[in-house]
């Protein structure tokens, strides 16, 4: 079984994810842009039972552009957001794809959401389902 490790910038907080992700997506909503400091967020969805958290995480709760709230787990030392649990998807953990620090992380995003808020220069990968 595949195991992948995601961690914060300082390494204090990490997640071990077993198996293949349920979904890999990108989100262009304004809340994700603010949270990541980037033009979009890139996340990997796993069943909660497949994710083990190691280290200390702090939590903040924030509503996204949809109005749905998520509980974000971040490192209290370096501030990196590593994972989150959306209230609208019980039993699911989303992991920041960049926290895996693996440029070969397969496959590319399968779903793109909030495309109407996408920066004009961002190109969505071919074959990616668009949920605008």
Image (tube, grey):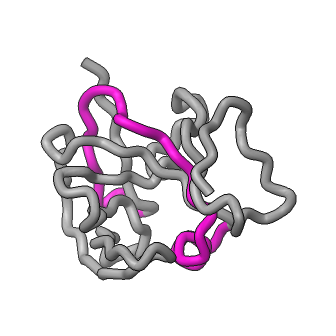
User: Residue 77: horizontal and vertical position, in percent?
Assistant: 34, 76
Residue 29 part of the magenta segment:
yes
User: Residue 31: horizontal and vertical position, in percent?
Assistant: 53, 77
Q: Which residue is at 34% across, 59% downward?
A: 83
- Which residue is most to the top? 1
Q: Quadrant of residue 90?
A: bottom left
Q: Which residue is at 41% across, 67% downward?
A: 81
Q: Quadrant of residue 70?
A: bottom left
- Which residue is most to the front? 132
Residue span colored magenta: 10-38
Q: Quadrant of residue 80?
A: bottom left
Is 19 in front, or is 26? 26
User: Residue 50: horizontal and vertical position, in percent?
Assistant: 19, 38
Q: Which residue is at 37% across, 81% downward?
A: 62
Is 72 in front, or is 12? 72
- The image shows residue 62, relative to residue 102, as above or below, that is below
| 71 displayed left or right of 111 | left
Residue 110 part of the magenta segment:
no
- The image shows residue 91, relative to residue 69, as above or below, that is above
> Where the N terminus falls, by quadrant?
top left
> Where the C terminus falls, by quadrant?
bottom right
Is 55 in front, or is 109? 109
| 81 displayed left or right of 108 | left
């Amino acid at each position: 079984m595949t195991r992948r490790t995601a961690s914060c910038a300082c390494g204090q907080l990490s997640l071990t994810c077993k198996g293949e992700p349920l979904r890999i997506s990108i989100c262009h909503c304004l809340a994700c842009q603010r949270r990541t400091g980037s033009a979009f967020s890139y996340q990997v969805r796993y069943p909660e039972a497949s994710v083990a958290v190691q280290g200390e995480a702090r939590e903040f709760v924030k509503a996204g552009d949809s109005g749905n709230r998520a509980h974000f787990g971040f490192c209290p030392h370096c501030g990196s957001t590593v994972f989150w649990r959306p209230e609208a998807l019980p039993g699911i953990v989303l992991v920041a794809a960049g926290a895996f620090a693996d440029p070969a992380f397969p496959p590319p995003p399968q779903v793109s959401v909030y495309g109407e808020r996408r920066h004009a220069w961002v190109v969505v990968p071919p074959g990616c389902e668009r949920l605008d």
